[in-house]
Image (cartoon, rainbow, N blue to C red):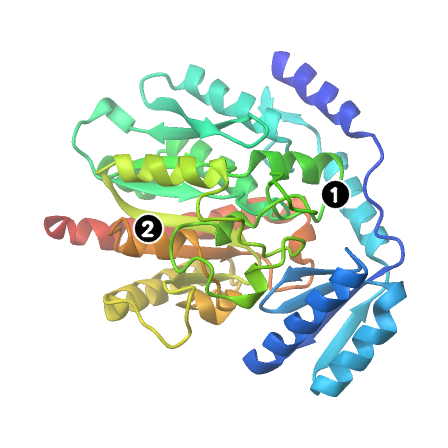
Amino acid sequence: MRILIICTLAYIALVSSKKSYNGYELLNIELNNYQRILLIENLISINKVQPASVVILKIQPFVLLVHGEVAELIYELLTNLGTKYSIEENIDNLLKIHENYNSMAPLQSNGTLNLNRYHTYDNIVQWMFQMKRDHSNDVKIIKIGKSWQKRSIFTIKINKGGKIGRKAIWLDAGIHANEWIGPAVMLYFIKDLLTGNSQMINFMTDNFDWYITPVINPDGYNFAWKHDRLWRKTRSSHPNNKCVGVDANRNWNIFFGEKLDTKDECSNTYEGPFAFSEPEVKAVASFLKSKHDIIAYLAFHSYSQAWMIPFANSKSDKPRDYDRLINMAKDISAAVTSKNGEKYTFGRISEFAGEATGSSADYTYLKLNITYSFGVELRDRGFYGFLLPPDQIFPTAQENLVGLYTLSQRLASLRNTF
């Protein structure tokens, strides 16, 4: 009853004014790496003259939000670059449909949070502590740090049976505030690992401990809920910056500052004034560095449907363990695809998300020597994009749980190498 009251009050609080995208158009653009560099250079110049007139939502595939005031200029630019693009004009309608669809699902199911809908950060944290109360012998809640706005960042550790000395697998999501499917899937993973009794679940919990952080960027996620559904960055405010926020997956201390598109403080991919400027990123990195039991790191994102290996920084460089990692990603993506028939692919992060500096998986692989570092792009392949309907949460979690099982099997067979 208590959690139902909390959820209801939280939802009522959300019925406030939200950012309107009336007058914006969404463009899906096909371009090569050279065209992308030229386009980003021009977009930075346009935004300096008319701030927030162009918003890069995703690098690969390249997705733009363009205000009508500069639309013709952008169309001319794209034509001159020789690119192909499609236009979606009713962004506000899509956002309203998404919000209404989620609000139609009940907040509670069988006395607990309904995991077949998206939830606020406060509700996620309340649910995590409820899991701790319900499974006190198998769960530990760890506060690993605080966000810029002083929200606590929580990790849940699952240690079934209290066995000492097991190696662990780390999962995180919500580093980008608009990727809501990630945190939702994390809750399903927690529930299944704690309550499931199948051969698959038993194998995963008998062989490994699990650290799961549903939301790395709670400030951004909260802002996306209350004010701007498509908000991506943190909510930090650094001296002399005219725009708020940093892309937390450009802020890790690896290859930092090597790309043009990360320099513009008003860009969605702004890297920050210095590496680890974001307390959220620094907190996660410090925690990972302090734990010597973690042998695999998985960062969940959306969208594209892919299991990916380092590097994010370069399409030409390969990690030293390339053959081992790419074969593992191939097997995992095939297993994920087999569950529901939704095609997942595999490759290096840079091949799916574009070349990006300061990413978490590159950092854990190179700086922390966590060989089995992966990025995972969840559903879908672009039809709904960041506005994935809540009825997609369960199948997305279901198929990727099979991926975690396949990963667990491969890692268990290599345990003598750790």
Which secondary structure lies at badge 2? helix
Q: Quadrant of the N terminus?
A: top right
Q: Whole-percent x and y of residue 401?
A: 42, 47
The numbered mark, 2 or 1, whose residue comes first in the sequence reads: 1
Is 96 placed above or below 406 here?
above
Q: Is residue 231 visible?
A: yes
Q: Nearer the viewer, residue 336 or 261?
A: 261
Within-10-Å neighbours for mark 1: few <14, some 14–19, many 20+: many
Q: Which residue lies under the disc numbered 2?
A: 364
Q: Which residue lies under the disc numbered 1?
A: 228
Q: Please, which residue is most extreme toward the top here?
A: 2
80 horizontally vs 185: left or right: right
Is 143 placed above or below 92 here?
above
Picture quadrant where residue 307 is located = bottom left
Label 1 amino acid?
A: Asp
Q: Please, which residue is most extreme toward the front here?
A: 240
Q: Whole-percent x and y of residue 68?
A: 88, 64
Is 15 placed above or below 51 here?
above
Q: Please, which residue is most extreme toward the left here?
A: 416
Q: Whole-percent x and y of residue 64?
A: 72, 65
Residue drawn at point x = 24 percent, y = 65 percent: 321
Which secondary structure lies at badge 1? loop
Residue drawn at point x = 61 percent, y = 69 percent: 61
Within-10-Å neighbours for mark 2: few <14, some 14–19, many 20+: many
Badge number at residue 92: none
